[in-house]
Image: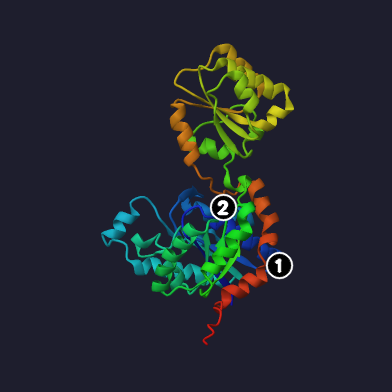
Amino acid sequence: MAHKIYISATDQNAGKTTMSIALLDLARKAGLRIAFIKPVGPKPVDYAGGQIDKDALTVAQVFGLEDQLELMCPVVVTQGMTQRAIRGEIPVAELEAAILAAVAKLEAQCDLLVIEGAGHSGVGAVLGLSNARVAALLKAPVLMITGGGIGSVVDAVTLNLALYRESGAQVRMLVANKLHISHRETSLEYLRLAFTDADFSVVGGFDYLPTLANPTLKRVAKLLDAKVHGDQSALMRIVHHVDLGAGSTQRMVDQVKANTLLLVTNSRNELIVTLANLYQHRPEYRDRLVGLIITGISGVSPITQLILAESGLPYLRIPKKMSDLFLTLHEFVSKLSGEDSEKINLIRTLAPKRFDLPATLSQMATPRSPPAVHQE
């Protein structure tokens, strides 16, 4: 019988797909047959003439599981579906039957089935398919991912646990993810103390790393629906900093950090020309600058455009206010895609250092026994 792990979280963007990839990679390296399913997919993308959740597509591309795609997301949440569900036009029993059928087929062909939820415990409730409900339906032990704090984490975990318990799902492991290195051991110590009497174990996940947390230039371009001009080999570079080119030219040249995406207005010809020349002739500025986003309705001057084109410095032209774009970029949280080779390779490298697959499978199979209470 295949091992099943239901990966949930206390909130969105906690690292569920990262965890899925880590566990699947460890399992494949251990010689296990692997499979993945996202029972309810709230973020559909077009693929091969149909629609699939983008996390399911990412995992399929990373592990070459495209032949399983038709089973990897039995309920794709398309536009208008939630309204139809509320009106009673989509029977919950049919959706549950589709999920159960897909899981049964995948279980028959694998040794480890990773089941990825969609956000916190209540996501999907509008369809009658909250994460807690689906985990209980599939009789799959839950691995819950949370953040790297203490007080806010305890609050969020307690809130989410209530719905899992009410639904009859069993949370077996809590993974504190995106931990800051300087506070890692302290955070884990206090979380274990806070959940001393719980029937799940508390383990540390990945540390907070800009490479995993931040988007590539290509993802930024997709977010802004814009074309990247210039050096196309920079598309997969990861943006660690987003900065405003609002200071003097000299100040901006001096303070630009490594892997920076700089927003400049179309009127800053001197700054654009200077950065273009530095990018073309000074290798250290190729490391510092991922590219430019040039804002404003009108174009730059012809000579500036010529120098920029000759330099190869990647840039995007966005006819919006710089302040609006800056806010959009800072609110943007990158999601993994199958094309993010640097991130995928990093996950594969770090996974064996953070997770022991046999121990994880054992803990997921058996509830943790809380410490005995000694009475005097």
Q: Disc 1 marks which residue?
A: 30
Give the number of the disc on residue 223: none
**Amino acid type of the residue that numbered disc 1 sits on in the rendered structure:** Ala
Q: Are dots 1 and 2 in contact, CB under 8 Å?
A: no
- Work out whether 132 lies above or below 334: below
Residue at 49% across, 42% down: 332
Image coordinates for residue 39, horizontal then vertical, percent: 46, 63
Residue at 36% across, 62% down: 125
**Amino acid type of the residue that numbered disc 2 sits on in the rendered structure:** Thr
Q: Secondary structure at mark 2?
A: helix
Q: Is residue 131 visible?
A: no
Figure quadrant of the N terminus: bottom right
Image coordinates for residue 215, horizontal then vertical, percent: 57, 42
Residue extending farthest to the bottom is 376
> Considering depth in this image, is 195 or 223 the residue closer to the camera?
195
Residue extending farthest to the left is 87
Q: Residues within 10 Å of mark 2 (few under 14, many from 20)?
A: many
Residue at 57% across, 78% down: 366
Give the number of the disc on residue 58: 2
Spatial CA span between label 1 and label 2? 21 Å
Q: Secondary structure at mark 1?
A: loop
Residue 136 shown left or right of residue 277 in the figure = left
Q: Residues within 10 Å of mark 1 (few under 14, many from 20)?
A: few
Residue 31 shown left or right of residue 249 in the figure = right
- Work out whether 40 lies above or below 210: below
